[in-house]
Image (cartoon, helix red, strand yellow):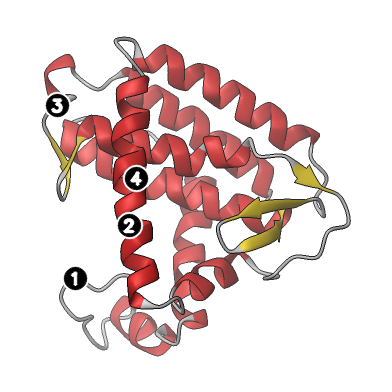
Amino acid sequence: MDFRRNYRAAAVSFADLVARVPADRWDGPGLGSWTVRDLVGHAVTSGLHQVLRPTTPDATPVVDTPEGFWAFTRTVPADVYAAAVHASTENARTVGRDLGDSPAIAVRDLVGRATAAVADARDDDVISTLIGGIRIRDWLPTRTFELVVHGLDIGAAAGVSFNLPEPALAEATAHAARIAVAAGDGTGVLRALTGRGTLPPDFSVV
C-alpha cells in the first residue's frame, strides 16, 4: 500500500467530513467529555499539525515500525500518560476554538499544507514526535490511523457519513491489528475477528 496516497485520501476525506458537520452539532457531544469541536481540534492536531513538523535527514529513529510508536506509548508510567491525556484535552479545545467560524476552510488549508509537506519529505527523513524521532514512512501510517479513527468518531457524533476510500480504511484496520500484536494482544484480537472469542468491554489497541 502507498502510505502517502492513503494519508492524502484520509486527509481529503476528513476535510470533506468537517465541511458537512451541521452548524448545530459543533457544540454538541463528541467523544467522552469532548464536544464535536474539541474532537475535530484533536484530529487536526494529531492528523495534520503533527505532519507539518520539520524533518531531519539521517537522524536516528527511536522506533522502526508504525505499530512500534503505539507499543512504546503503552509503556510510559501512568502519571506521565495521565498528564499527556490532560494536555491533549486542553490542546483539542484550543485548536478547535482556533478553527473559528469557518472550520471547513481552516481544515482544507491545513490538509493542503500537510499533504504538500508529505510529498516533499523523503521516506527515511526523521520527524520529531513525543516519544522521539520516527521515519516518515513509519510515522505517516499512524497519522492516517488518527484521521480515520477520529473521522469515524466525528461522523458518528455529528450524524454524517465519513466517505473514506477503501485503501485508507484497509491500511488503518491492518495497522490496528499490527498494534494489537505489538502490544501482546494479537491472539485475542484475531480470535475475536474470526468469531472464536470476545474482547473485554472497552478494549482498545491504543
- Front of the two marks 3 and 2: 2
Helix, strand or loop status at disc 4:
helix
- Mark 1 or mark 2, earlier in chain: 2
Identified by mark 1, the residue type is Asp
- Front of the two marks 4 and 3: 3
Image quarter of the C terminus: bottom left
Crowding at label 1, few (<14), some or many (≥20) Cα neighbours within 10 Å?
few
- Mark 3 or mark 2, earlier in chain: 3
Q: CA distance from mark 2 to mark 4?
A: 16 Å
Quadrant position of residue 195: bottom left
Q: Residue at x 56, y 42 (%)?
A: 50
Instruction: Point out residue 189 in the picture as x, y percentages from the top left corner.
Output: 35, 80
Q: CA distance from mark 1 to mark 2?
A: 17 Å
Identified by mark 2, the residue type is Val
Identified by mark 3, the residue type is Asp
Q: Residue at x 46, y 79 (%)?
A: 75
Instruction: Point out residue 63 in the picture as x, y percentages from the top left corner.
Output: 67, 71
Q: CA distance from mark 4 to mark 1?
A: 16 Å
Helix, strand or loop status at disc 2:
helix
- The residue where tag 2 is placed is 85
Task: Mark 1 and mark 3 in contact? Answer it, CB < 8 Å.
Answer: no
- The residue where tag 4 is placed is 150
Q: Residue at x 70, y 70 (%)?
A: 64
